[in-house]
Image: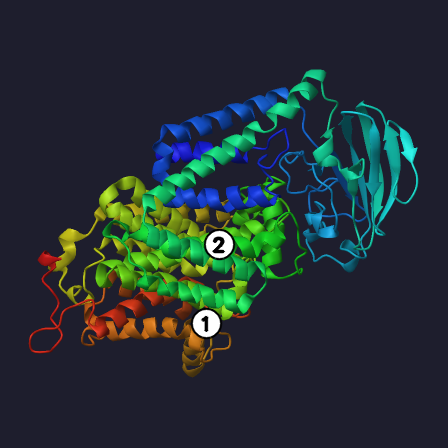
Amino acid sequence: MTWLWGLMAAVAILWPDRISGPFDGVPLDGLAEAALIGLVFPALWWFHPRFLRTTRAHACILVLVAWKICSTLLFVQDGWCVTFEPARPFAKDAGRAPHAWDLRADWRAPDPACSAIMTRSYRELSEFPAWFFNLPPPNDSWPEPVDRPPAATVAMRVHGYVSAPSAGVLQFEGAPGVGGWASVDGRRLTGVSPAASVGPGRHYIAIDAVLTGNDWALIARWNGLDLWQRATATVRRPSPIDLAVRPWIRWIPTLAVLSLLSLWAASAIARIGDMPVLAWMTGMSMLIGLLTYFDNPVLSRWAIAALGAAVLVPVPPRLRNICGACALIGIPWLTFVLVGGIPSIGRFRIYTSGDDYWMYQRFGYRIVMQGYWLEGGSQVFYFQPFYRWISGLLHAVFGDSSVGERFWDGMCLLAGALLSFRITRPFAGFRWGLVATAMPLAVFALGTARYLIGYGLSEISSAGLMSMAALYAIRSRGRGTIAAIAAGVLATLGFYTRLNNGIMAVGVALFALPLSLPLCTIVRPAAWWRRVSWRTVFGVGGVIALGLLFFAWRTYHFTGVFSVFYGTQRYIVAIWQPGMALKAYVEGLIYNVMLVLTVNDPPRFDVYALPVLGGALIAMLSVIGAPRLRELPAVAVLFFFASIAGAFITRGWVYAGRFSVHVLPITCALATCGCAQWIGRARRRAPSGRTAPCVDPREL
């Protein structure tokens, strides 16, 4: 039942709290909650789930659940209601007011009374809940200049109550782009920074503003200090009991969340329990964090590559596993991901209209905020399908900010690195496994694809889901049917996220084979047939088949055509086109494959892509029976060809490196295994000096 407690914890932590505070649920627009809930919590859940079996965890989770229920039933919502009304129509099937990514507001209403709930001051345009500037006009075309700042004109209305503990001065500050008026208890305020002396008690606040240009601000102060920390602001008039208990109950959720996460982290550290490992983890995390925080991108990226030096750290036998790899390499990597995302927390950005990432954003809004969950924003998927759901759900958690996409991408890249470790360790040992873990992260951080993290494209998500599917498929060999079904679900979602990776999704079933099985034994089915985990084969294959049927049915539901690829770019991006000469086809095929393997568009030599090229070359040499390389893990070699297969069918362009992300883990694993084999660490040499033949499978 560990997963159930984890799910309860996630719901309790994320559920919007009526009482604002450092950990008040979605949207995660503060530094502490975005970092600890948005990244640390899922990392602990993934790496150390056994803590959820403890009584301490159960107590913290139950306190949070009870608190959120009481908060929802007993208290009025903190903050003020903010309503935007753009001068020009926006978004298909929308009302007069747009939704912000704020589930505390009327997020399920077609025409919300509140676009967002204001619980902090807005000091610049990017801090306003004005993500709706990314929406297309009602005709689904591209936004025109007058639809976005600085040419756009937007009316903004704010209303609510402030409960003052004593007499004081309430003041509002704006900016040149904010015009209008504010009132307290119906009395209009005047001046550049309007202020009013108010007595103790509850007062009604109203602001009616017009926003133009791009120099925006709305700051509320109480006696010259931040209002939100000095007085109680609520959407509706609070009761006397509500006001009386707020000062001492508002810290309950904060203490519960901090207790849960600190106890969890302490348990994870105790599980590691080795000083050299902890010293390396802490030191590299601090180094990478400081380099990233002080905006030294070159050194921070090279520090990621330096994580490979973890092979020099003495590691006890009990940590020579995926847990040790997470501690030595995963935690410093996540520090890089977290610190690099700090400037984006609580701030939105305006996407370039017409690009792929803008399409995913607008479709995500239509799915989550307008309720088109099955349609997915469009009746056919000309753009990749599932990432629009991912982006929408991440916005639902992190609000208008896109920092959630950076955190998600970072976790997906780490999943790929851990898959590389999981493949390499049984063949070459733990230290070579660490090399294989650091290598794909280093190739990504130093190579041309590094800009993709948090960029809003689907490739990293698909690669991450495929890597998670493979990890669950490996686990399913010894842990039952649930892991096999989970692998199938993740592989199906990876295919949905990027349809080009369909063969790769099916290839996840290859992990039904033992990781230690040499490739040279594949030609003798009798040697491995009985060792196949048919649970994994049927679990992965069956779920993918059901996923394809559902996908085709959904297309039929909206178009009348029962097809997976109808309405997609399948025939536009296909390398083979009707009437194409054979020479042109071969040239296009080679170009596209090299585009993937060189991690560059157009293809060119790149020293940082050598592990990808080397891994591909090693896979091909292994297949043709090259000495020593023919003993590489069969799963790794075959999964590489499943991963690269899409490049033989469809081509890509633009966004250098985006079409290579999914092959980074497997090629780096192959490159590491190949190096280990040639150096002689993975297999002993025969007495004659020749490579030892493939071992009898019965001895594996």
Location of the N terminus (image quadrant): top left
Q: Is residue 584 above or below residue 146?
A: below
Q: State the count of labels.
A: 2
Q: Position of residue 629 (x, y in %)?
A: 22, 72
Left or right: 553, with 684 as reference point = right
Q: Is residue 306 above or below residue 106?
A: below
Residue situated in front as seen by the camera: 324 or 29: 324
> Which disc is residue 599 wearing?
1
> Which disc is residue 335 wearing?
2
Distance CA(mark 1)–CA(mark 2):
25 Å
Q: Position of residue 635 (x, y in %)?
A: 26, 60
Q: Position of residue 174 (x, y in %)?
A: 83, 46
Residue situated in front as seen by the camera: 531 or 182: 182
Q: Could you tell me which residue is drawn at 37 percent across and 65 percent down? A: 308
> Disc 1 or disc 2, which is closer to the eye?
2
Q: Is residue 343 above or below residue 44?
A: below
Left or right: 381, with 607 as reference point = right
Q: Could you tell me which residue is drawn at 72 percent across and 21 percent down? A: 238
Type of residue at label 1?
Answer: Val
